[in-house]
Amino acid sequence: QVQLVESGGGLVQAGGSLRLSCATSGRTYAMGWFRQAPGKEREFLVGISGSGGRTAYGDSVKGRFSISRETTKNTVVLQMNGLKPEHTALYYCAASPSLSPTIYYTEEKEYQYWGQGTQVTVST
């Protein structure tokens, strides 16, 4: 069973920043981040290839969030800037094996493994 360990959530004031990390063990996976606010569907935020060289961002976070990969540690980091109260949600890390290190995924159904989620709360 693949475990994803998320960290970095918390409470931040509007306009502030947070940095989320997600670590896996074993092989290298294509990875991504999603969020789910109360009463809403899970939303794709960003995906990154196993090599870290290719990324895709959801429209709602382009220019505001950025993802990076520490390949030696099998860890991805999501840097979130300019946070707003509407960004309050449970943030999930996801991972999936891929046929190529250049592949990333953008659909929830493409991810095989999920973290428990880390809460991000943005206050006014």
Image (tube, rainbow, N blue to C red):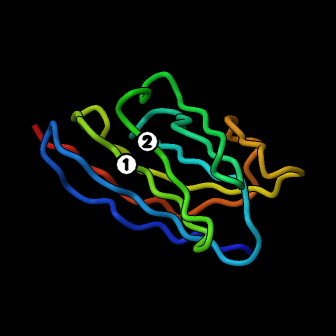
Residue at 71% from the left image edge and 55% from the top image edge: 50
Residue at image mark 2: 66
Residue at image mark 1: 79
Query: In the rendered view, would you say 27 is above or below 107?
Result: below
Q: Nearer the viewer, residue 74 or 33?
A: 74
Q: Nearer the viewer, residue 69 or 124?
A: 69
Query: In the rendered view, would you say 78 is above or below 55?
Result: below
* Tag 1 and tag 2, C-beta contact below 8 Å: yes
Q: Amino acid at mark 2?
A: Ser
Residue at 28% from the left image edge and 52% from the top image edge: 18
Q: Earlier in the sequence, mark 1 or mark 2?
A: 2
Residue at 60% from the left image edge and 48% from the top image edge: 32
Q: Secondary structure at mark 1?
A: strand
Left or right: 102 with respect to 12? right
Q: Secondary structure at mark 2?
A: strand
Image quarter (top left, top right, bottom left or bottom right) of the N terminus: bottom right
Quick one: label 2, few (<14), some, or many (20+) residues within 10 Å? some
Residue 36 at x, y = what percent? Answer: 46, 42
Count of all numbered marks drawn on residues in the image? 2
Residue 37 at x, y = what percent? Answer: 40, 39
Left or right: 107 with respect to 87? right
Instruction: Name which quarter of the figure residue 115 lies in.
Output: bottom right
